[in-house]
Amino acid sequence: MSIDARARKVQRVVDPKMYSLDAIFGAAYVLLGRAWVHLDRDRKGQIVVTLKSKKAAARDELQRLSDDFENELVDQVVRLQLAKKHVKLREMIVGRAMFGATGVGAEQTGVGDGADDYLADPLGIAVPWEERFIGVKASEGPPRASLGGDGGAGARLAERSPPVKKVEAAVEKKEAPPEDEVPPATGTEGAE
């Protein structure tokens, strides 16, 4: 390793038998924000790495730059080994993601059991609250709000629908709903 503080350069030799070219290029890439990188080969086939600091640097800063390059070489070797070791797992994950995105091969991947899976509502999320908590279908009562140009969307109630009347009656009587049917919050709790 040689350091030229006046030229802001540090030069080191890397054995390509110990570190692959991919690892050397990866380590050089990581340092591109801090230094210009020049890679060359000497007569023995060794890789000569020249790092030139992008800003003024003292000798100890150039030494740190060289040390960081050496540590990054080790990081790159480990990263490449892990990538090689887990190539099948990565291919499987990407393959399943591609099958799921296209909707093709759901039976082959074991995801879902057909084209109508998206219509299923096992948690009852799509059930209107009137049906769920009071037992009256929302379509049985008249529309509860006027959405026309007569004062704004929902500004006036056209008529109290049967579900609303049942809720108001339960509130007036101060009856507790059954434990398995809890009405949704109205935002008026504690307003008495």
Image: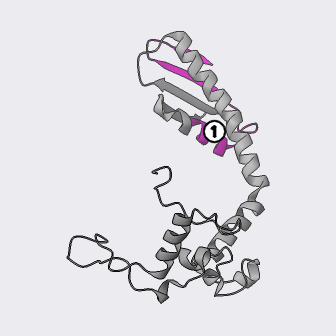
Q: Which quadrant of the figure has residue 14?
A: top right
Amino acid type at image mark 1: Ile
Quick check: is 179 in the magenta stretch? no
Residue 120: name its quadrant.
bottom right
The colour scheme of the drawn protein is one colour
Residue range corresponding to the magenta coloring: 1-28
Q: Is residue 44 visible?
A: no
Q: Is residue 26 magenta?
A: yes
Q: At which x and y percent is residue 40? A: 56, 36
Residue sitting at 64 percent across and 87 percent down?
116
Look at 61% across and 76% down and name the residue there. 132
Establish if 110 lies above or below 41: below
Left or right of 14 in this view: 164:
left
Image position of 77 with respect to 179: above or below:
above
How far across and how far down the image is residue 191, in percent?
Answer: 45, 51
User: Looking at the rendering, which quadrant does residue 158 occupy?
Assistant: bottom left
Residue ID for mark 1: 24
Q: Residues within 10 Å of mark 1 (few under 14, many from 20)?
A: many
The secondary structure type at the circle numbered 1 is helix
Name above or below for residue 156 compared with residue 21.
Answer: below
Visible in this render: residue 12? yes
* Residue sticking out furthest to the right: 85
Residue 103 % position (x, y): 61, 81
Which residue shows up at 64% across the image and 67% down it? 177
Q: What is the number of callouts on the image?
A: 1
Q: Is residue 146 left or right of residue 19?
A: left
In-front residue for pair 45/21 = 21
User: Of 119 and 174, which appears nearest the observer?
Assistant: 174
123 horizontally vs 37: left or right: right
Check the image and report above or below for 36 versus 121. Answer: above
